[in-house]
Amino acid sequence: MKELVLGRLIVLLVLLAAMWLVVSGHFDPFLLISGAVASGLVAVIAWRMGAVDEEGVPVQLAAGLVRYLPWLAWQVAVSNVRVAAVILSPAMKLDPASGWVEAHQKTAVGLVAFANSITLTPGTVSLSVETDRIHVHALSRQGLEDLGRGEMDRRVAAMEGHR
């Protein structure tokens, strides 16, 4: 059990340090040391809080995430074009809709990933999350119907290792 927590702690530390490098974009020694210290401090605080578990550092989703993120990025791009077309249209034909979308995720991490994926996709936002469904507001009825078909739900469930 301790090896698993240590492994997750190391993964968290590496991810925090990588994020520091990507966001800062500076590589002088003082900033590298500051980033390492800050990353280490945050990792230790997360460990002391008991947040270095399968929910706080979900390394078990890594393989599924590699397959899911490119699909999600494509969906975000397609939705951006659709929203831009609606906004730039002289008639601006809005057809807002709100409704519940089924969620078949088995874990809290999977459910949160599904709700966040909905919100990341332009034109839709997750309003409320329950154990088996998510209340969604969409810019168009078509967007809500697309979510209702369940493709995103299936892909998130597959990412978490189900379905």
Image (cartoon, rainbow, N blue to C red):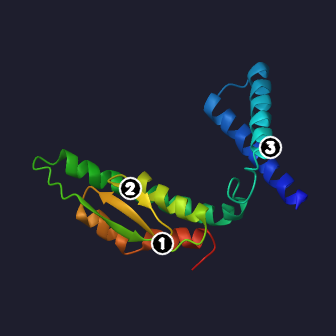
- In the image, residue 63 lies at what x, y percent? 67, 65
Q: Which residue is mark 3?
A: 48
Q: Looking at the rendering, which quadrant does residue 36 occupy?
A: top right
Q: Residue at 53% across / 68% down in the picture?
A: 156
Residue bearing mark 2 = 127
Q: Are marks 1 and 3 in contact (CB under 8 Å)?
A: no
- Which element carries disc 2, helix, strand or loop? strand
Kindly identify the amino acid type of the residue bearing the numbered disc 1: Asp
Mark 3, Cα crowd under 10 Å, few <14 / some 14-19 / many 20+, is few
Element type where label 1 sits in the image:
loop
- Measured as percent of width and height from the top left, residue 93 is found at 14, 54
Real-space CA distance between mark 1 and mark 3, rounded to the nearest whole angstrom: 32 Å
Is 1 drawn above or below residue 80 in the view shown?
Answer: below
Q: How many marks?
A: 3
Q: Residue at x 57, y 73 (%)?
A: 158
Q: Which residue is mark 1?
A: 132
Q: Secondary structure at mark 3?
A: helix
Q: Earlier in the sequence, mark 1 or mark 3?
A: 3
**Residue 140, image quadrant:** bottom left
- Mark closer to the chain start, 3 or 2: 3
Along the viewing direction, whichever of 84 and 9 lies nearer the viewer:
9
Q: Residue at x 53, y 64 (%)?
A: 111
Residue 78 shown left or right of residue 33 in the figure: left
